[in-house]
Image: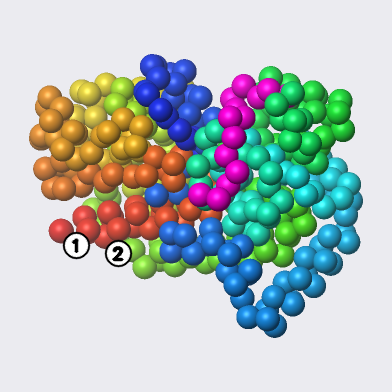
Amino acid sequence: MPLPHLLRRRAPRSGARRTARRLAVTVPLVSLAGVLALTGCANRERDAAPGAGTSTTASSAAQTAAFPVQVTVPGTDHAVTVERRPERIVSLAPSSTESLFAIGAGEQVVAVDNQSNYPEQAPRTDLSGYTPNIEAITGYNPDLVIASNDTEQLVASLEKVKVPVLLLPSPHNLDELYAEVTALGKATGHLTEAEDLVRTMRSDIDKIVKDTPKPAKQLTYYHELDPQLYSATSRTFIGQIYGLFGLVNVADAAGGTGDYPQLSPEHVINANPDLVFLADTKCCGQDAAAVAARPGWQSVTAVRDNGVVALNDDIASRWGPRVVDLVRTVSDAVTRTAQQG
């Protein structure tokens, strides 16, 4: 799994189940606005000059004429045929919701799940992506449903009522993320916009990484999913984002086979990471002061040298256009540390 594309945590749930559920819809990767500019693609297109608007309309018309389309998600055995351009889309995955609006398909979205809180204009409902209610979903008369996994046999149930489902599981790396954005574009009649977004994301991320100064020594880091010290290894989507900067993940040496291990305080303290990234600021009120107040953590380099970085939980747990924001945040932290010597 990756970014533990995850999201939404009201009151903290306990143990591995809480963390796994969080990461499934969202994380784990994947704060995931330079990027805000990306997620505003749809708005920019609507506000464009008359000539640009005409071009966009012509492009959309051509893509609409291309239906029916078969959409296959690379790395999976899932394929779906969309007979005509969908006009009533239900999104049950926050990452997909963000991407839909970023590629200009927002006006086709009639309902999103209760965790899809971005962008603000997304039609948020009580629908659950974790425990989907088929009757509630079909109540919106969808002609396409987007989900991150086949929870509760979602696909089979909706196929019975002739509603296609596009499954976009959490990607393992950026290439898979780009492929999923492209798949969304193809399925919704916005392929050109999706390809443009992918090119922009790829270019922005490449430039950020290239322009980030290389520290004199290889830096170590700890990524925190919650105050129970669940973390993510380098095998996850979020771990690979850090890997772009050559950072060493202290969770990799924790032992075990899971991608989201629960670390002990002793392990983190002894690993003495140069950087600590907190993906539990919104859910659990964690910040640099809270980390410094933990017994024994005052000696950790990241705490001592102002290397504790507060992330936006949602951006750090979703795979979508705002991953560029996450990359930029990591770059800023690495740059500050490198400049400190």
Residue at the spot 23% in from the left edge and 39% down from the top edge: 287
Marks 1/2 in contact by CB < 8 Å: the verdict is yes
140 relative to 108, above or below: above
Q: Viewer-proximal residue, 19 or 179? A: 19
Q: Report helix, strand or loop for mark 2.
A: loop
Image coordinates of residue 127 in percent, x first then y, are: 62, 30
Residue ID for mark 1? 339
| Residue 105 found in image quarter | bottom right
Does the magenta-highlighted stretch encompass residue 132? yes
| Residue 95 found in image quarter | top right
Label number found at residue 213: 2
Residues in magenta, as a range: 120-134
Residue at the spot 34% in from the left edge and 57% down from the top edge: 331
Q: Choose the circle earlier in sequence order: 1 or 2.
A: 2
Image coordinates of residue 6 in percent, x first then y, are: 49, 35
Q: Tell me the crowding category of disc 1: few under 14, some 14 to 19, or many 20 or more residues within 10 angstroms, Cα based.
A: few
Q: Is residue 216 visible?
A: no
Is the magenta region chiefly helix, strand or loop?
Answer: loop
Residue at the spot 74% in from the left edge and 35% down from the top edge: 140
Q: Report helix, strand or loop for mark 1.
A: helix
